[in-house]
Amino acid sequence: MLTGVNVALGVTGSIAAVKVVELAHELRRRGASVRAVLSPSAQGIIHPWAVEYATDNPVVTEITGRVEHVELCGREGWADVFLVAPATANTVGKIASAVDDTPVTTCATTALGAEVPVVVAPAMHEPMYDHPGVLDAIERVASWGVEFVEPRIEEGKAKIAAEDTIALEVARAATPGPLDGKNVVITSGATSEPVDPIRVLTSRSSGKTGRAVARACYAAGANVALVHPGESVPYATDVRVETAAEMLDAVSDLVTAFPADALVSVAAISDYTTDAAGEKIRSGRELSLDLHPTPKLIDEIRDDYPNLPIVGFKAETGGDDAAMVAAARETLERAGLSFVVANDASVMGEDETRAVFVREHSVREYGGSKAELGRRVAEELAAELAE
């Protein structure tokens, strides 16, 4: 996600500075090179040596005759993006007023003047975050194109966002994305069909692949609507559903209202439903259920939106690649899809996957992480929309 990206990391005097070591590691694990800049207050919380160890680079603790702020964040500088994490209320206010009295605020002013992307992750007590002056400063700085990573409001504190969330925002800001300005609807997870008020029919899908695709599309610049039954995510318009019918209705509405430039149907949508009992079915006796097929989401959407680019996913069991490709090709042709990702159902719930990209005249195999698969799907989708 951040391969080849140079991140200048500004650290200010919030207690959340203790999390910077892990944040730097997270950025580097995703492929970034990191160089840190510490304010004097930050140095009272975390030692520069610890940050030097985490980044594997010398740390800037003062601006000297080497003009470190220009070397890092100037027009010809090293950084592809300047990340301030954590950012105190004091620092946000100074950035908004172009006050340059610490290495971090001086780098921020330089980056904004040089049009280097800036990402800010605030961390402070909640009353400070709610102060009208701080909110005005955030609004003003955001109007300049600075990306703010919303803090987590917990225990009376505006806590710094999770490392994973910050890394995703840095990836989105770092370079112009191939999906900039595109609206992409993505389905994810396993729908469930009620049998009675307690029991459901569902599948083993974890939703990991769908979320990976959504994250990758967001990092590539897309506006993402995620239709799923899972926990809310911070990077997408979150539409929660349970049943196949609810998912179809939600996608149909979004394609028009969003409006969608593309649909990526990753979800394991229930193929069958049943007439649910109004009360709990008592156990201890034999029971038969009458199953009724549910409408195929991609077929229904294709009928209503004949020109919408749609990407399908097709899970198969047995590990037979030829059978996976044949099933994917049937879906591709039936629904007029852009391409289909056929995947082995045995990897449900795992972090690694095995898949085959099936197009009308090509078949390409993939093996690796679901996160990387998501990036590949985003790339293929961007190429499709560019045509």
Image (tube, grey):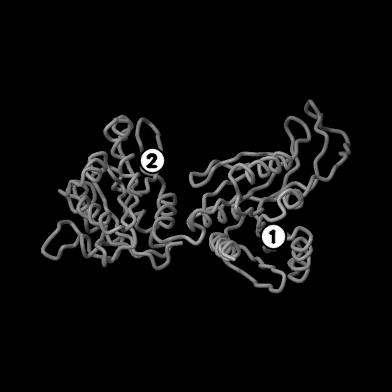
Of the pair 185 and 303, the residue shown nearer to us? 303
Give the vertical position of 108 relative to 386 (above or below).
above
Mark 1: few/some/many CA within 10 Å (<14, 14-19, 20+): some
Image coordinates of residue 333 in percent, x first then y, are 77, 63
* Amino acid type indicated by mark 1: Ser
Instruction: Using the numbered discs, state the Cα–Cα distance from disc 2 to disc 1 in whole angstroms.
Output: 37 Å
| Residue 109 appears in the rendering | yes
Does 94 sit left or right of 312 as displayed? left
Query: In terms of image quadrants, where is residue 138?
Result: top left
**Quick one: quadrant of the C terminus?**
bottom right
Q: Is residue 134 above or below residue 23?
A: above
Report whether 339 appears left or right of 289: left
Residue 226 position, x and y percent, is 58, 46
Q: Which residue is mark 1?
A: 346
Asked which quadrant contains residue 331, the reply is bottom right
Q: Is residue 70 above or below residue 124?
A: below
- In this picture, residue 238 sits left or right of residue 201: left
- 341 and 332: which is toward the camera: 332
Question: What percent of the width, then of the height, locates residue 206?
Answer: 63, 50
Determine the secondary structure under disc 2: loop
Q: Is residue 343 visible?
A: no
- Name the residue located 62 percent from the left edge and 43 percent from the top edge: 254
Q: Residue at x 69, y 60 (%)?
A: 346
Q: Secondary structure at mark 1?
A: helix
Going by the numbered disc 2, the residue's amino acid type is Pro
Q: What residue is rendered at 17% in x and 56% in y?
A: 61
From this view, report whether residue 376 is shown above or below residue 267.
Answer: below
Q: Residue furthest left?
A: 65
Residue 243 picture location, percent across and down: 71, 40
Task: Tell me which numbered mark, 2 or 1, is placed earlier along the sequence.
Answer: 2
Residue occupied by mark 2:
151
